[in-house]
Image (cartoon, rainbow, N blue to C red):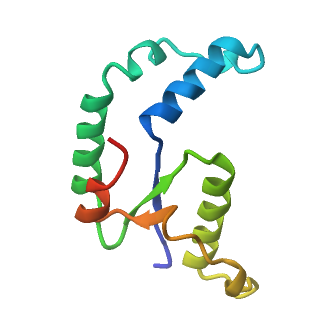
Amino acid sequence: DGIQILKYYLDISKPEQARRLADRDKDPLKQWKKSPIDAVALVKWDDYTAARDDMLRRTDFTHAPWFAVHTDDKRQARLNTIRHIIKSIDCPETDKALAVPDETIVLQATKKTIAALHR
């Protein structure tokens, strides 16, 4: 049928999330990003982490795999996600040699890699 599903979970560390949330309070250009959920996000970190792990395990399928992307470095996360998508899809016009993602940034979500995500 030609349909290909790639799912990406953007993983951030707790210290980096705290830094970004603090930046939203300080920088007027980022204040539009503020949300009421931000106030509880770090407090419920462990609950969210357990829910994330459960969701990844329950919804990862051979025909629709999950990939985790370490996003503490936004630029590298974005570049490597793009490379991974280009590498994964059938696009004959693309030079696949240029589409080599860093496997420490974009990794397939397996039991082992899920356990290694940020806690």
User: How far from the left and from the top, in percent, is residue 75?
Assistant: 69, 51
Q: Quadrant of residue 99?
A: bottom right
Q: Is residue 47 left or right of residue 96?
A: left
The residue that appears at 77% across and 19% down in the rendered structure is 29
The residue that appears at 50% across and 78% down in the rendered structure is 2
Quarter the C terminus occupies:
top left
User: How far from the left and from the top, in percent, is residue 43?
Assistant: 33, 19
Q: Quadrant of residue 48?
A: top left
The residue that appears at 29% across and 61% down in the rendered structure is 60
Taking 103 as reference, is 34 above or below it?
A: above
The residue that appears at 67% across and 85% down in the rendered structure is 96
Taking 103 as reference, is 93 above or below it?
A: below
Taking 43 as reference, is 90 above or below it?
A: below
Tag count in the figure?
Answer: 0
Q: Is residue 66 left or right of residue 48?
A: right
Q: Quadrant of residue 112?
A: bottom left
Question: Is 8 in front, or is 25?
Answer: 25
User: How far from the left and from the top, in percent, is residue 45?
Assistant: 33, 28
Q: Is residue 65 left or right of residue 112?
A: right
Question: Is 62 in front, or is 110?
Answer: 110
Pick out the residue farthest to the front. Answer: 15
